[in-house]
Amino acid sequence: MSSPKSLLGWILLVVLPLLVCDQVIKIWIKLSFAVGQKASFIPGLLELQFIENEGMAFGWALPGAAGKLVLTIFRLLAAVGIGFYLNKLIRSRVHKGLLACVSFVWAGAIGNIIDSAVYGQLFTRSSWGMFADWARSGEGYAPLLMGNVVDMFHFVVRWPAGFPIESLAGREVFPPIWNLADAAISCGVISILIGQRVFFREAESSPEAMDS
């Protein structure tokens, strides 16, 4: 199967499937788990643990309502910029691996934007011991652009008790709780860093780059 040659093609091939999976998981967690509730997913490796993140990926946040609004607007602008950048890369006929990586980052950015932009209007509030539900008009837990991002995946792997670095011994290898959108962004960025010599060497040698 040949690679898509348009922005719409990459949206249908990579971005849309990731977005659908991300949102299906988040909606299921939001409606089926109370905040803090846990369930085993891959025993000894990964569990489901529902939290709501007011900030960036992996639980990082800017303080206050103003910080949250600034963050959501920044996400929106970043997503628009990534979309234009991806379209430019497609027109430049760069390495398909680079296009896939940027598509992953774009899908992850849009996935978390959806949460923060509209979840506050779509759902009632989640809390300890209480599930959320679909919100009727005026019953949402937050205004537009002020919703929380739904996170649920948590690695339970720990460093061995006898680990040479004492400060890490017995601690979780990766404590943050994350979602599929976070994973897509991280995988896309890491893959670009690993494959940058191949990706950008091909970009520099493309006919469009030679003519510029």
Image: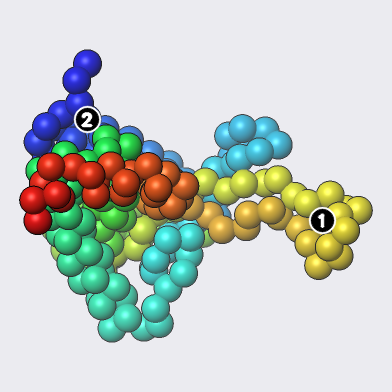
Q: What residue type is labelled 1?
A: Gly
List the residue tagged with mark 2.
13
Identify the secondary structure beneath mark 1. loop
Do callouts 1 and 2 mark residues in contact (Cβ within 8 Å)? Answer: no
Q: Nearer the viewer, residue 33 or 46?
A: 46
Look at the picture and state if 104 lies above or below 85. Answer: above
Q: How crowded is mark 1: few (under 14 residues within 10 Å), some or many (20 or more)?
A: some
Give me the residue at 47% from left, 47% from top.
Answer: 194
* Whole-percent x, y for residue 87 in the image: 12, 47
Residue 74 at x, y = what percent?
A: 24, 71
Give neighbour class at mark 2: few <14, some 14-19, many 20+ (Cα, 10 Å): some
Q: Which structural element holds mark 2?
A: helix
Q: Which amino acid does label 2 sit on?
A: Leu
Residue 30 visible within the image: no
The quarter in which the N terminus is drawn is top left
- Residue sitting at 13 percent across and 42 percent down? 207
Taking the image as drawn, is residue 60 in sight? Answer: yes
Residue name at image x 40 percent, y 47 percent: 197
